[in-house]
Image (cartoon, helix red, strand yellow):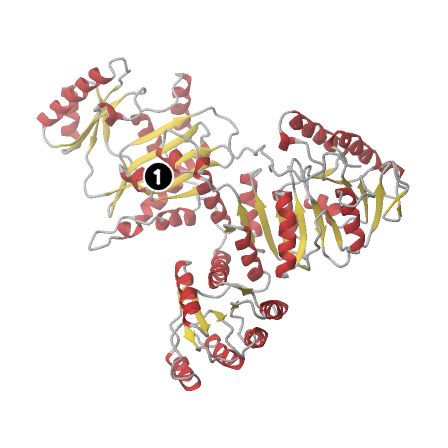
Amino acid sequence: MPPSSLEPFFRPRSIAVVGASRAPGTIGHQILHNLITHGYQGVVYPVNPQASAVHSIPAYPSVEDIPGPVDLAVVVVPKGHVPDVVESCGRKGVPALVVISAGFREVGGDGVEREEALMEQVRRFGMRLVGPNCMGLLNTDPALSMNATFAPTMPPGGTVSFLSQSGALGVTILDYAAELGIGIRNFVSVGNKPDVSGNDLLEYWEGEDGTDVILMYLETFGNPKKFTQLARRVTRRKPIVVVKSGRSVAGARAASSHTGSLAGADDTVDALLAQCGVLRADTVQDLFDLAVAFSTLKPPKGDRVAIVTNAGGPGIMTADACEALGLRVAELSPETQDRLRELLPEEASVGNPVDLVASATAESYKTVLDLVLHDPEVDAAIAAFVPPLGVRQVDVAGALVDASEGADGKPLLAVLMGREGLPEGRNRLREAGVPAYIFPESAAQALAALHRYGRWLERPPEEPRSFPVERERVAGILDAAWDEGRRSLTEPETLGVLAAYGIPVVEHFLTSSAEEAVERARQIGFPVVLKLVSPEIAHKSDVGGVRVDLRTEEEVREAYQKIRTSLERNRPDARVDGILVTRFVEGARETIVGMTLDPAFGPVLMFGLGGIYVETLGDVAFRVHPVTDRDAREMVRSIRSYPLLEGTRGGEAVDQEALVQVIQRVSQLVGEHDRIHELDVNPFLIGSWGGVAVDGHMGLGPAGPMRSKPSSRPTTSSVGPTSER
């Protein structure tokens, strides 16, 4: 449904609280109390069949008894009464429902059926639903001033909109926002989200003028493919910062391929968010640290940071954090350093970090920051202050505010350490739009995120490439294998599929005798490799089925016989299609290009060092299909061993363009053939001359629409009432 269908949630002219209660301490009492206390500008209708008035407001037995129209109904009744309430709202013509009540899909069993029945009602009446099992929503716009949650705190108004999949965490989030003074525009606790989802809210906030920054706490992705499409677009206009729970490696799926065993769920989330320009925070604390910066600052033009402090320790800590996060500690110009020597005491340090020493005053900070922020070698600054005797936090905060106003658009972040005067100093900075932190690492992390987002905005939008390929030929190979009851292709079949998609493959021939193998070896040219081909044996080397670097005809004959003998000893019952003879490629790096099928995200691609090192070192990078040219380049350059591909210590650099194109061709292959569920091109040998696939594994599965299936697992936090009137 269009984003406009969410308007009744955020701009209701009237709200019915169904289950409004006279009893303090109940959710039905708190929600009505919040609407009244925080000055909701519309009409509120308490609904309670056992009360004539609640909070001194006339109450109604049911929604249908309300004389005027109702835009939004907040439902706070036991789960067994929810169907009757929804039916009544449907007949009344209420367009939007927030069901606080718990006891649905999150409890399993009958709760699943209860939620499905609820959605049938909602669809039948054409309504929209937030929840069930949620804590409500709010909009701080002064024209509305709506707090339809049961949280005890109303955050200050601002431009940050927040989605939380956890209701229990939502209460803490609002408290924390109020404590830090982060201005919230909208807050939504989505609960089980069978209808209104994170994707719906992204689309709504994209066009909502009052929202400049979007924060999300997610436990699951409902439709990752749609999220990708939306986020790529939204992040061009507004930053999105996400905390995604579930980083444990225990979530990694077991799989027979190298890619599947390495691609844990969290790697997939990291890849997805990076491709969309979404910034990921590790914790809720980090989320708010980033929110403080993004709600007030624009991204810096570069990564060069000046650090100004009155103590050596915080300066070193800030510098270390900046370097670790990909920022550069700026080299101040000679002119700036000369001027600093004139202004500062002899014991001060005029390099970067600039150490003003403990005798520094508020005026010292203002003067020095004016200098470094106007240095052409500086793109941003972090000012750290440890309060000595006689200098107040609030005075230094005022100096930082003054410096920020003349900073020519360069971001300035503050670190106020120590407790004395901290609230007053932070309040002064916050009011002036200068982000303030207690620890240097927090400021560095926020600035690094601003820088990453700025680089994302500089990138032109990009679509995946489409290569001319033999699509029908590949479909025939895959369908034929599946019809035979096989769940993987043989190596010659896999190489044939790769070749049909323009991926260079090693010259190879399937042979059925030792003499034929010798003849093909002469044709290819020595040295060669012999490999067993059997649809029943996935790992050939485990049964002695691989012989490499064979340089004479006699070595080929001997290797052929050893493979046959080893097979008869280890797997005499296995079906054998023959012995593959391939060219032995020398002077190249072993890499791997692979894909595994994630049940929620669809195809996930991997690149890294290949051969025997792939799982030993685990030096790999992931991206979610489809992969663009830029995505592929980032995969190649982001592995730790990338210097080996560039040619370190006199080594020859490899053809990186060949790797980039192979990754994109594999992306097109798995996107066009949903029968492919696993793929390893391992190793893909790469040198200065180009690259070639010398081996591969391709696992098969049922064909069909298995890309990005919506997740059915809701949030596990139950926050709604189970019994309340």
Disc 1 marks a residue whose amino acid type is Val
Position of 355 with respect to 17 (left or right) is left
| Residue located farthest toward the front when viewing the structure as drawn | 389
Nearer-the-camera pick, 654 or 174: 174
Whole-percent x and y of residue 38? Answer: 77, 55
Q: Could you say which is closer to the camera, residue 723 or residue 410?
A: 723
Q: Quadrant of the N terminus?
A: top right
Whether residue 673 is visible: yes
Q: Is residue 203 visible?
A: no
**Residue 448 position in % (x across, y down):** 47, 60
At x 53%, y 81%, the residue is: 363
Q: Give whichever of 93, 159 is nearer the camera.
A: 159
Q: Position of residue 55 (x, y in %)?
A: 85, 48
Callout 1 secondary element: strand
Q: Residue at x 38, y 75 (%)?
A: 351
Rendering coords of residue 332 (x, y %): 39, 75
Q: Is residue 186 left or right of residue 583?
A: right
Q: Is residue 255 above or below residue 240?
A: above
- From what the image shows, is residue 378 above or below residue 464? below
Label 1: which residue?
A: 593
- Drawn side of residue 59 relative to residue 544, left or right: right
Local packing at callout 1 (Cα closer than 10 Å; few below 14, some 14-19, many 20+) is many
Name the image quarter holding the C terminus.
Answer: top right
Is the residue 273 above or below the residue 560 in the image? below
> Image quadrant of residue 259?
top left
Identify the residue at the far top of this view: 573
Query: Is 535 placed above or below 296 here?
Result: above
Residue at left offset 8%, top offset 25%:
554
- Residue in the image at 10% along x and 27% along y: 555
